[in-house]
Image (spheres, rainbow, N blue to C red):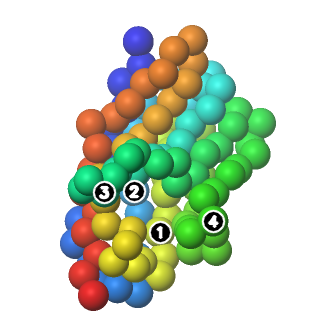
Amino acid sequence: QVQLVESGGGLVQAGGSLRLSCATSGRIISMNVMGWYRQAPGKQRELVASLSSGGSTTYRDSVKGRFTISRDNAKNTLYLQMNSLKPEDTAVYYCYAQRLGDYWGQGTQVTVSS
């Protein structure tokens, strides 16, 4: 069983930055894939960024050049640095991990005001 705990969400003005953190109960290097999803009201959950065990990253087009996914193996923590935030980035952000199963965090709210 893997537990994921997100933090770092909040309210920020457009153009601002936030860094989300996801602390894992297991060794982060044992995860096949980790990532960040988001879900806005009335919309489906969508992949924002992912990071494979080998270090490969993927980003949805709308966040490329603005968001960066990374991890700290020593702290067993996944990060999402979000810069140049836009109102359309407003959503609940969820941490995801895959290792012999799919695991989700409880979510953290990000609100970007115009």
Quarter holding residue 86: bottom left
The residue under the point 57% across, 18% down is: 99
Rounded to the nearest whole Å, what is the CA distance between mark 3 and mark 2?
17 Å
Front one among 111 and 8: 111
Residue type at the position of mark 1: Met
Residue drawn 29% across and 44% down?
Answer: 107
Measure how far apart labels 1 and 2 are at the Cα level: 8 Å
Q: Do the residues labelled 1 and 2 touch (CB within 8 Å)?
A: yes
Mark 3 and mark 4 in contact (Cβ < 8 Å)?
no
Residue at mark 4: 61
Q: Mark 2 points at which residue?
A: 20
Q: Is residue 25 visible?
A: no
Of all residues, the one furthest to the front in this rendering is 42
Regarding mark 3 in the picture, which secondary structure is present there?
A: loop
* Residue of label 3: 40
User: Which of pointers 2 and 4 lies earlier in the amino acid sequence?
Assistant: 2
Image coords of residue 96 (percent x, y): 46, 35
